[in-house]
Image (cartoon, rainbow, N blue to C red):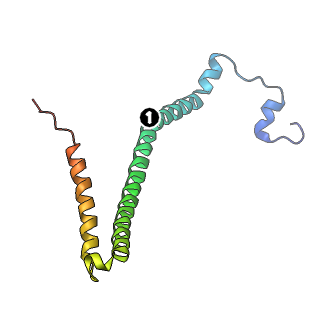
Amino acid sequence: MASGSSPRHAARDRGAVAPTGAAAAQQDWPAQAADTIERVVGSVRDKTTGPAITVARWVVYGTFALVVGAVVGVMLAIAAVRALDAYLPDAWVGEQHTWAAHLIVGVLFSLVGMLAWSRRSAPTPAD
C-alpha cells in the first residue's frame, strides 16, 4: 500500500486499470440512471413551476396594485371634499357648505362614470 492512501484506494495505487467500454457502462449504470432521473425531473419542474410562479407573481402584484389604487382613490376623494369645503366661499353657499363639496365631488364622479359608460363596447352576440 502506498504511503498516505486509504485502504479503499489500494487497488488504484497498485496500478489497477479502470474498466473501459461495456464493462465501464455496466458499472456506471446507477449514475447514468440517477442523471437521467435528475434531468427529467428538472425539465418537468421547469415546465410546471416556472409558469406557476409567474402567474402567482401576477396575482400578488395585481392584488397589491388594486388595493393601493383603491386606497389612493378614496384618499383623493376625501382630499377633494375637504379642499372644497375649506375653499368654497361662504357668501356663495352659506357657512355650512360641506353638502356643496359632496355635491361637486359626486357630480364629478357621475360625469366620469357616464363618460366611461358611453365609451363601453357593446357585447358581441353569442350566436
Tell which of 36 and 97 is nearer to you.
Answer: 97
Amino acid type for the residue under numbered disc 1? Lys
Is residue 119 depicted above or below 93 in this figure? above
Q: Which residue is mark 1?
A: 47
Is residue 14 depicted above or below 94 in this figure? above
Quadrant where the C terminus sits is top left
Tell which of 28 and 65 is nearer to you.
Answer: 65
Is residue 60 depicted above or below 105 in this figure? above
The number of numbered discs placed on residues in the rendered structure image is 1
Tell which of 99 and 14 is nearer to you.
Answer: 99
Q: Hey, which quadrant is residue 88 in on the image?
A: bottom left
Q: x%, y% of residue 65?
A: 40, 55
Query: What kind of element bears circle 1?
Result: helix
- Image check: 64 left or right of 105? right
Q: x%, y% of residue 81?
A: 33, 71
Residue lying at 88% horizontally and 42% vertically, measured from the top left: 4
- Image check: 34 left or right of 2? left
